[in-house]
Image (tube, coloured by chain):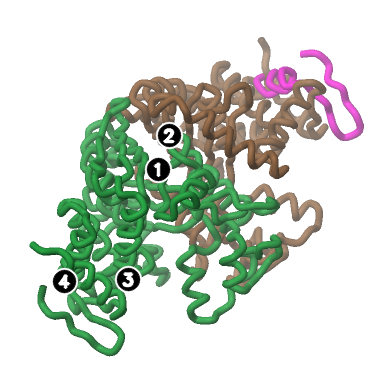
Chain colours: A green, B brown
């Protein structure tokens, strides 16, 4: 590895350097090389997109999970076709990026051929953001939708306890000569990462996003972290959260967020549960979809409304040119883990 | 038809009486019998579910549309399979319930066989709610999702003009020995029907749901009706509205809400545009989905949280027992239209 550019308490690295650092750390901690490279590339790319909450620090989370669940190190995802338009990937307790690396090309193939297909991922330690997968499909002309459950951090309005996960949903739409239109958001009113960021900066929460342990509204992010989040958009957000619980849980034959949380409390690891994706071979529907969609994107851009993926792509371009910074402590920890690995 | 029970300015009818009244009115206005019966049954059922904004008064809207667009009377929806898992129904300027009557059984068949399938409806005068279709599929063990664009009544936050429709989304999930879990909501912060109801009762709007013609926040529903609605849930609702524009518009080869509005202003009729449905043959994914889902529904019911379809089913049961009331003026108008029809 080339020497990284260290400034104060941050270290500047390129995406390639970051991926190498992460892969060495994972191999040092006992991960087989293939799995280590898949995870390392994934998290380095997410970090380069400016999302540190889902970036390289999750390497440490994977290693922690592998310590309490050594079966993850042996895990090899197995794909099957329970139905012609359905790809099922049993992660066998492996990590989500490894299961997706197997499932996405199969989903792409089936959806392109049949016009629409689903990918059900089971028995997965979910450790990642959803946008890289829908973006990967949309880069290949497919329209894509992805959902996953999580741990039960969300209390439906009017309930006495937490029942939903933060249950993100992501969508990708292909564009000619441009990066896809992609969104990826939690159906909780604020994400866990957002909450942590507010605690770190000593800021207050907006109203109506969280309750304390007694179920009383709070704008204090620390109280919210001990208490429960609410869904975004009131009963409509709650309806979407329910839909995501059903599709990424019972439909794929995996846990509800509440159940996943109970399993995790027994072990202390990354959330273990399912994921559900739909891919649409848009070209099978007709030839006008891209042009018609550009009309809408044009209006939004004329209004100076940034598309939800705008900031991520800008950060990525910047990272590609000049690398990106990670905390020196994280750099040091990864480096140290990698030091135990001999090629 | 049996004589209806008239009280004051309301008339109480059974679902069968209402459907007969509506069918006679449509035939009196020149609709062919098959089309008249499909529309009449549909709107009578929606009225019986307690949703008068999408109920029998829309019969008058259909007749008005047929007057300015006489091609609707000749319309016969034609189904095709552009791809093995995709059913396309060209409504040929007919009304949405007639196109769905052709498309839903085909969607059911393909999704049950392949595991997932899509239905794209094009060139449709959209006049209906979305829940009857997802409920129909869920009643047959399919998980269903439906979306449609509408007219451009919604201004994205930060924009200077209206760009989205109220763009509803509906979802259905099958349950054993119970009516399905169904939701159907507008991605606008308030529906057009909700706005009209507040105007009628002289009530104020909640904050952050609409702006006046100058783009200033307003809680006056009359000013909101002249101005624009906002999306629910801020940027997340706007992202969903964009997804629905893309799927129910460009993907199916039909108008964006803005374009549909421009076409309508030239003619003055029901919104003409597309609709997009996904059906999932859940049984193809495994056998545990219904039981696992009941765990979630059980928790929600233990918390006394009403499922979104609860009220509709209660009203339907009441209507089945005792009929339902419609305004005497609407009853009179339909009766008069039917009077011009000779069997």
Question: Could you tell me which secondary element the residue under label 2 belongs to?
Answer: loop
Residue, disc 2: A253
Q: Position of residue B47 (x, y in %)?
A: 70, 31
Q: Which mark is residue B264?
A: none
Q: Are marks 2 and 1 in contact (CB under 8 Å)?
A: yes
Disc nearer the start of the sequence (3/2) = 3
Q: Along the line of sight, which residue is nearer the eye, A193 or B104?
A: A193
Label 4 Cα neighbours within 10 Å, binned few <14 / some 14-19 / many ≥20: some
Taking the spot 55% from the left edge, 21% from the top edge, the residue there is: B35
Boundaries of the magenta span: B1-23
**Label 2 vs label 4: CA separation?**
38 Å
Q: Does mark 4 fall on the same chain as mark 2? A: yes
Label 2 Cα neighbours within 10 Å, binned few <14 / some 14-19 / many ≥20: many
Q: Is residue B16 magenta?
A: yes
Q: Are marks 2 and 4 in contact (CB under 8 Å)?
A: no
Disc nearer the start of the sequence (1/3) = 3
Among the 4 quarters of the image, the one containing residue B28: top right
Label 3 Cα neighbours within 10 Å, binned few <14 / some 14-19 / many ≥20: many
Q: Position of residue B247 (x, y in %)?
A: 39, 45
> In the rendered image, which quarter contains the C terminus of chain A?
bottom left
Residue, disc 1: A274
Q: Which mark is residue A50?
A: 3
Question: Could you tell me which secondary element the residue under label 3 belongs to?
Answer: loop
Q: Does mark 4 fall on the same chain as mark 3? A: yes
Taking the spot 64% from the left edge, 61% from the top edge, the residue there is: B226
Question: Could you tell me which secondary element the residue under label 1 belongs to?
Answer: strand
Residue, disc 4: A17
């Amino acid at each position: 590895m080339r020497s990284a550019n260290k400034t104060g308490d941050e270290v500047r690295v390129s995406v390639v350097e970051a991926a190498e650092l992460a892969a060495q750390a994972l191999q040092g901690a006992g991960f087989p090389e293939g799995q280590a490279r898949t995870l390392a590339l994934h998290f380095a790319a997410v970090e380069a997109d400016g999302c540190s909450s889902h970036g390289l620090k999750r390497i440490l989370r994977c290693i922690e999970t592998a310590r309490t669940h050594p079966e993850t190190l042996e895990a090899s995802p197995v794909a099957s076709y329970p139905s012609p338009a359905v790809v099922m990937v049993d992660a066998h307790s492996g990590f989500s990026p490894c299961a997706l690396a197997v499932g996405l090309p199969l989903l792409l193939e089936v959806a392109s051929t049949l016009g629409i297909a689903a990918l059900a991922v089971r028995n997965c330690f979910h450790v990642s953001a959803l946008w890289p997968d829908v973006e990967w499909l949309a880069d290949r002309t497919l329209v894509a939708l992805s959902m996953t459950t999580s741990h039960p951090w969300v209390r439906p309005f009017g309930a006495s306890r937490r029942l939903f996960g933060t249950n993100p949903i992501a969508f990708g739409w292909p564009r000619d000569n441009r990066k896809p239109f992609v969104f990826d958001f939690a159906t909780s009113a604020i994400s866990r990462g957002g909450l942590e960021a507010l605690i770190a900066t000593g800021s207050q929460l907006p109203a109506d996003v969280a309750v304390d342990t007694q179920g009383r509204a709070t704008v204090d992010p620390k109280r919210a972290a001990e208490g429960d989040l609410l869904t975004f958009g009131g009963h409509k957000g709650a309806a979407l959260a329910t839909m995501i619980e059903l599709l990424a849980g019972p439909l794929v034959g995996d846990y509800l967020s509440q159940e996943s949380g109970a399993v995790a409390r027994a072990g202390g690891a990354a959330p273990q549960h399912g994921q559900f994706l739909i891919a649409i071979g848009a070209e099978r529907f007709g030839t006008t979809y891209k042009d018609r969609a550009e009309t809408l994107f044009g209006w939004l851009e004329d209004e100076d409304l940034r598309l939800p993926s705008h900031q991520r792509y800008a950060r990525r371009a910047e990272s590609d040119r000049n690398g990106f910074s990670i905390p020196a402590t994280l750099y040091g920890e990864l480096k140290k883990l990698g030091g135990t690995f001999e090629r």
